[in-house]
Image: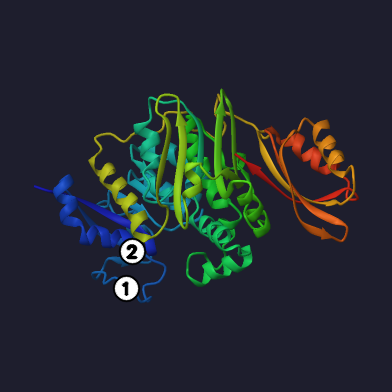
Amino acid sequence: MDRTITIGFLGCGNVGGGVWKLLSGFADDIAHRTGLRFSIKRVLVRSLAKRRDIDFPDGVLTDRAEDVLDDPEISIVLEFLGGEEPAHRWITMALERGKTVVTANKVAFALHWHELQKAAKQSGAGLYYEAAVCGAIPIIHTLEESLQANRISYIYGIVNGTTNYILTRMSREGAEYADVLADAQRLGLAEPDPASDVEGLDAAYKLSILASLAFHGRVPFENVYVEGITQVQAEDIRCGQELGYTLKLLAIAKRDGLHVETRVHPTFIRNDHPLANISGAFNAVFLHGHACGEMMFMGRGAGDLPTASAIVSDLVRAASAQKHLYPTFDNELHPAVSLQNNTDWRCAFYTRMLAKDEPGVLSRIAQTFADHGVSIAAMQQKGEQRDGRVTVVFITHQASERDMQKAILEIRPEVATVESLLRVE
């Protein structure tokens, strides 16, 4: 005999619609595999008058949040609102009322995780968030359960499909950023206002969650260094390709003892790195554990059905749980023992300059680097002279972020102008 669980939706956009379709069309398969059936009693929407491609039964739709939050028959709430508010407030209210919450909301979750977990533990409710990071890829479940016997030392992630699509197109076609972005918006692959994606914020929210789980300590969103792709130029992608590198917007987290670095920025990686071949709108996470070694997870990180797949997985896990589990690290705004944020990381650097075309200039640049502890691994002069200057590209050995920034600032304009600076992993 199948057990029926009564649930409610907060919001029903593309992802909520995907969950409705999955729970409707795949219900018998889910019941056969799990012994569970899900009855969607109420669905919160902004407007009852809006035309929809789902034929909801009478009485299911509501524009009153309390119809979901205060209904004693609804034991699990699925949140699809997105953004910080009112999602944060309503998730908290649901948890305080003892309702388990399944969410895909990386913003509200990353910013208020400590509050939400506290509310869940006090009422005994569950809090599930697999879909908040990388859509269909089960990376949250993997970090929470499958890799518990590992000490994770680093994570590299391509966790935003929009930026990966743009950089893939720029790499393959030699196109400029603005042209590819406009095309992506026309195709519906980028939002009309793409700032959260292209400025790196979306990836930073996700990295805050991933790093906290991987390193077993709270890594606040505000500790993530963020740099987007809006300034990336096709010329730099071409220069990198000639030197054997591919450009990706990487979410990077590394741990050394209690010292953690978390950063999101355009990054050159070697063409033979597994992440270099992750193209289009796909996501991937590459990590290293002391026991498992290197592992990579790849799949669709967005879209209605891929994200719905993760949500329904969490829904089944929540409904099957005898007791809800929570991360065991000190999940507080100010933990008693906190991970220390390192902002002076070490990596290699790519820089492109327009240097004065005369003897001694390259040695002066190299000396400036050396004065700050930065050594050059490779150098390439590009193209013809323009206005008495030539394009010169440098790849450095690993260097301190602060030292590299100081060296760049010390290069005088009459010697060379720095046109771009990108990190290399």
Residue 93 % position (x, y): 41, 48
Q: Earlier in the sequence, mark 2 or mark 1?
A: 2
In space, the residues marked 2 and 1 are separated at their CA atoms by 9 Å
The residue under label 1 is: 53
Asked if residue 414 can be seen in this view, the reply is yes
117 and 243: which is toward the camera: 243
The image quadrant of residue 334 is top right
Q: Could you tell me the amino acid type at mark 2?
A: Gly
Left or right: 124, with 356 as reference point: left
Tell whether label 1 touches label 2 (CB within 8 Å): yes
143 and 312: which is toward the camera: 143
Which disc number belongs to residue 151? none
- Element carrying mark 1: loop
Left or right: 99, with 274 as reference point: left
The image quadrant of residue 366 is top right
Q: Could you tell me the amino acid type at mark 1?
A: Asp
Left or right: 84, with 175 as reference point: left
Residue 376 % position (x, y): 74, 36
Q: Residue at x 24, y 35 (%)?
A: 322
**What sort of colour scheme is used for the picture?**
rainbow
Is 196 placed above or below 245 here?
below
Asked if residue 89 can be seen in this view, the reply is no
Is 167 placed above or below 395 here?
below
Q: How many marks can you see?
A: 2
The residue under label 2 is: 17
Residue 7 % position (x, y): 27, 54
Question: Quarter of the image containing the C terminus?
Answer: top right
